[in-house]
Image (cartoon, helix red, strand yellow):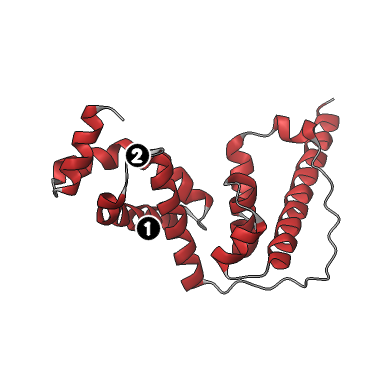
């Protein structure tokens, strides 16, 4: 962190609204993307973004200066989304014995898919599948950590991840079949 950034943080801690706006303007676009990954839609993402920044300004004194400031913020936004999720949704328990055979996704399909298309597919997942998928596949949490964060068993976390992957694979295969059909019709 440079001296200018440290001064900005210090000014935010002292309550300078101008400094807080600068910090918001600097990080809100990236953090909005994080919020979108954990929300149903853009309105909910905006709510999470606002809640997250309120927490950032309240907890800014707790930031030790060690590690990535952006990483510290990201954790606060993810936790804000998880808190909102726990309040609004009850996590559906997926039968632990349910076997989902979710093979690896065809790399050719995913290569042709834009990041926005894939994020849209992920956002269409049910809340419990989306949470587990994002925490595991995108954020890198273990099933043990996810089970604690969402108050579910590790088996449920694994099952929800497997089901999410299966749903995404089905969506990708349907997209691929649709594209192949369109290519045949265009000839």
Q: Which mark is residue 27?
A: 2
Drawn side of residue 10 relative to residue 127, left or right: left
Q: Is mark 1 on a helix, strand or loop?
A: helix
Question: Which residue: 83% across, 37% down?
Answer: 181
Disc on the earlier residue, 1 or 2 = 2
Q: Which mark is residue 47?
A: 1
Please rate how many residues cluster around mark 2, counting C-alpha atoms within 10 Å: few if below 14, some from 14 to 19, many from 20.
some
Question: Which residue: 58% across, 70% down?
Answer: 151
Within the image, what quadrant is residue 95 found in? bottom right
Drawn side of residue 3 relative to residue 163, left or right: left
Say which of 172 and 135 sits in front: 135
Q: Residue 126: tell me if it is visible.
A: no
Drawn side of residue 179 relative to residue 24, left or right: right
Q: Is residue 21 above or below residue 129?
A: above
Label 1 or label 2, whichever lies nearer to me, is: 2
Q: Residue 96: tell me if it is visible.
A: yes
Say which of 141 and 105 sits in front: 141
Q: Where is residue 55 in the image (x, y as percent from the top left)?
A: 31, 57
Question: Which residue: 83% across, 68% down?
Answer: 98
Q: Which mark is residue 28?
A: none
Give the quadrant of the C terminus: top right
Give the quadrant of the N terminus: top left
Q: Where is residue 168 in the image (x, y as percent from the top left)?
A: 72, 50
Drawn side of residue 132 relative to residue 182, left or right: left
Q: Where is residue 161 in the image (x, y as percent from the top left)?
A: 71, 57
Say which of 181 and 127 sits in front: 127
For the view shown, which residue lies furthest in the top direction?
A: 187
């Amino acid at each position: 962190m440079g001296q200018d950034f440290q001064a900005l943080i210090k000014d935010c801690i002292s309550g300078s609204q101008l400094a807080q706006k600068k910090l918001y303007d600097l990080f809100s676009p990236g953090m909005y993307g994080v919020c979108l990954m954990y929300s149903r839609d853009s309105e909910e993402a905006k709510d999470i973004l606002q809640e997250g920044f309120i927490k950032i300004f309240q907890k800014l004194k707790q930031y030790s200066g060690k590690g990535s400031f952006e990483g510290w913020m990201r954790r606060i936004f993810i936790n804000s989304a998880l808190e909102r999720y726990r309040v609004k949704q009850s996590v559906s328990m997926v039968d632990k014995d349910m076997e989902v055979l979710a093979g690896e996704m065809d790399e050719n399909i995913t290569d042709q898919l834009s990041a926005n298309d894939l994020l849209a597919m992920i956002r269409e997942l049910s809340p419990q599948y989306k949470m587990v998928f994002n925490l595991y596949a995108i954020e890198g949490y273990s099933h043990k950590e996810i089970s604690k964060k969402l108050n579910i068993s590790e088996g449920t976390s694994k099952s929800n991840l497997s089901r999410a992957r299966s749903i995404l694979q089905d969506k990708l295969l349907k997209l691929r079949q649709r594209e192949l059909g369109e290519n045949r019709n265009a000839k």
